Amino acid sequence: MLIEIRNLSFAYGHKTVINGLSHTINPGDYLVIKGKNGTGKTTLIKCLLGINPIKTGMVFFNGQDINSYNNWPKFGYVSQNLDNFNYEFPLTVEELLKFSTVTKASKQNYLKLLDQMGILDIVKQNINSLSGGQLQRVFIIRAMLNNPEVLILDEPTASIDKQNTDFFYQTINELNKQGITVILITHTESISHINYTHLLTMYLDKTSEISVNNKEDN
């Protein structure tokens, strides 16, 4: 999917968070959005997902204005703070994957994804009994069930250990190699382990800059 951001600005009341951002995300790109808290990273994602109404600037998906766009299953989204996820009633991993998709995903499909993520053995476990790393992988699988063209990840490694973090980036790199566009938010200073194609750095003074990663694939 081609995503075009044109002179986008967004404010909460009188507080401007994004100021005149323009960038084109081509199909298969891996965009890392980096910056300190309060620089507008999550705000930008909410604009791209249609959560924040766009009043200044424009966003197009394959040439279609976001204001008339309705094919949201093309986007897979994994939010931050999954460790705080909770249900008031027992729900297994299988039940979560089976009943939370927009389209009907076959059992074979989600079992295959669980196996690829190395967590097939937890399919019958209660969702509230999982570790942060396990829960993160379950939600990535849920985001992938509709075969999205764009996968958006908001601070996906904030609450998991280094081993699971390394496994996560290997997994996302593989998904990107398969042609899925990845948009990933991070506040981590070092991103040398990420095979991104473009880096969007956002600053507290509402400025931003785009750079291209010229390193060879790992």
Image (cartoon, rainbow, N blue to C red):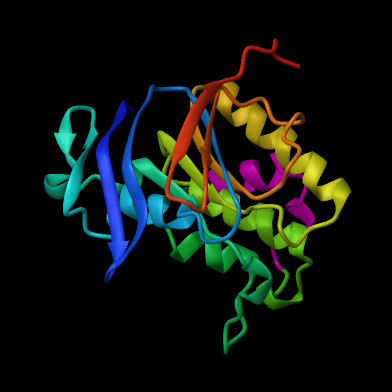
In which image quadrant can residue 34 be found?
top right
Q: Is residue 70 left or right of residue 72?
A: left
**Is residue 78 placed above or below 132 in the rendered structure?**
above
Main secondary structure found in the magenta portion: helix
**Is residue 156 placed above or below 198 in the rendered structure?**
below
Q: Is residue 30 left or right of residue 1?
A: right
Q: Could one spot residue 101 in this view of the protein?
A: yes
**Is residue 38 placed above or below 206 in the rendered structure?**
below
Residue 218 in percent (x, y) is at 76, 17
Q: Is residue 1 left or right of residue 121?
A: left
Pick the residue in front: 135 or 35: 35
In the displayed image of the protein, which residue is found farthest to the right? Answer: 163
Residue 62 in percent (x, y) is at 23, 28
Residue 167 in percent (x, y) is at 79, 40
Pick the residue in front: 75 or 111: 75
Query: Does the segment drawn in magenta span residue 115?
Result: yes
Q: Give the range drawn in magenta.
A: 107-124
In which image quadrant can residue 85 be found?
bottom right
Query: Does the segment drawn in magenta span residue 77?
Result: no
Residue 37 in percent (x, y) is at 58, 60
Q: Could one spot residue 122 in this view of the protein?
A: no
